[in-house]
Amino acid sequence: DRLRGTWDVAVDGEVIESGKVPRIDVAPRASAIADLGYTRPSLAPGEQAVLTVRFALARDEPWAPKGHVVAWDQAILRERPAAGIEAVGPPGQRDARRVRAPRAGEPARAVPRVGFDRDRASGAVLLTTGNGKRPGIELAVDGATGSVLSLGYAGEELWVAAPSLDLWRAATDNDGMKLFLDDDAKEMWVGMRNKPLTRWLELGLDHLHRTPVGGAVERGARGTAVVESRAKLWGSDTSVVGTHHTRSVISPEGTIHFEEEVILPEQWADPPRVGVCFALPPGFEQLEWCGLGPVDTYPDRRSGALLGRWQSTVTGQYVPYLVPQEHGNHAGTRWFTISAGDARGSAVGVRVDADLSRGSTTPDGLSFSASHFSAADLFCCVDTTELVPHEETIVHVDLAQRGLGTGSCGPDTLPRYRIAAGTHRWRWSLRPYLVTG
């Protein structure tokens, strides 16, 4: 009698049906079946339907008002795999997709193609999309290394820093207390020599060196362009080398599909994260995502979050720990957008999608964070008052983050929440867009 139950069905975070849970007469520690009577939702490729049930107070109580939610649970009703990143073979390879031949007397259809302009003097290649009706992207890359030089859209430069591999995070107190580094007097108390942070710093994961070892820019199938880049990375020991290979497929409609492969040497097993980091220019502040929220989540701290569609700001993602450290990660993210507005009422944004296709290495989504502080900022400051936010927005898109554990006062994270050495592959996509209104 003290509780009232409600339910809703949402597709990718948008509620399409809702109702009340029928009255249930059930004894403590027993169970009962209730017919909610929802309609089986139909889904487009890449969509997910989630049932959420909540129980809230039916009347005011001394400790909480009427309507206060005391329990909730969710179940994934069904999900439909996305089409995924189109497989694009090397130039000249036959396209497996069937294309209808023009009928007699019918003009041949023009196939959209990515513009391809090579500057022989500088070696840069400019890849362009779009037409007079809608803006397109202008992606400049180094023709020899495949390194991204710039990304333009609707007359604006979008990348202050292009995506690059990142294995580092600003250590949490559970990773190791940075205030006690090299403090022998406190070593017996906190045991820093056995903490992950100490090992990460000894390996030099906080300042990886990288050098390109090859790349190419070529035309792909179905009007695409394909950019290949390879780099080797090393930390404190130059004989211990990791590799990063990115294959970027630029589609004629202006989406960049990234296929990442990272090989970690055995010495780098159990790093803080495996992902990429890029920076957007000042003004990219509005944030929306579909996945776990609204609180930040990690591999071993996600059961308290709800699947849904969430809105926030980049500034609002900051968590003011007394000692600055890692925060703001969102695990299990299907997609997210970050946008910027101007005085004319228009906005430019970027949308990032996880690969949710069948056989993907990220069937539950990626992890991401967006902040006005870099990992280096958070790690070098010892008090939150020392932090000075950047006007730019620093974005992490991760295949994996190490679990948080309870190492500051208890056991470390479990082995299943740690990142292994070896080969890691994942795919993600980025699409700039223009919002008016």
Image: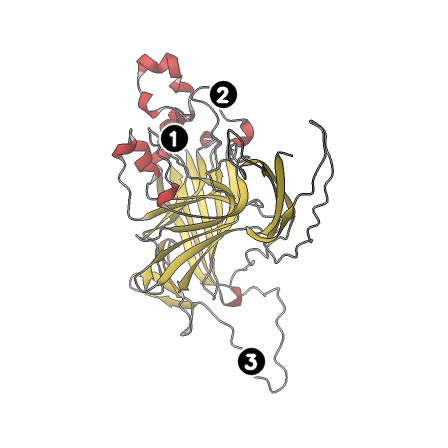
Q: Is residue 191 left or right of residue 343?
A: right
Q: Position of residue 43 (x, y in %)?
A: 63, 56
- Quadrant where the image shows the C terminus: bottom left
Q: Residues within 10 Å of mark 3 (few under 14, many from 20)?
A: few
Task: Tell us which disc is closer to us: 1 or 3.
Answer: 1
Which amino acid lies under the numbered mark 1 shown in the image of this protein?
Answer: Ala
- Quadrant where the image shows the N terminus: top right
- First of labels 2, 1 by sequence position: 1
Estimate the spatial distance between the alpha carbons at disc 2 and disc 1, rounded to whole Å: 16 Å
Nearest the eye: 103 or 43? 43
**Which residue lies at the image location 49% right of the left edge and 35% below the top edge?**
298
Which amino acid lies under the numbered mark 2 shown in the image of this protein?
Answer: Pro
Answer above or below: position of 246 versus 414: below
SS of the residue under disc 1: loop
SS of the residue under disc 2: loop
Disc 3 target residue: 108
Estimate the spatial distance between the alpha carbons at disc 1 and disc 3, rounded to whole Å: 58 Å
Answer above or below: position of 208 versus 427: above
Disc 1 target residue: 171
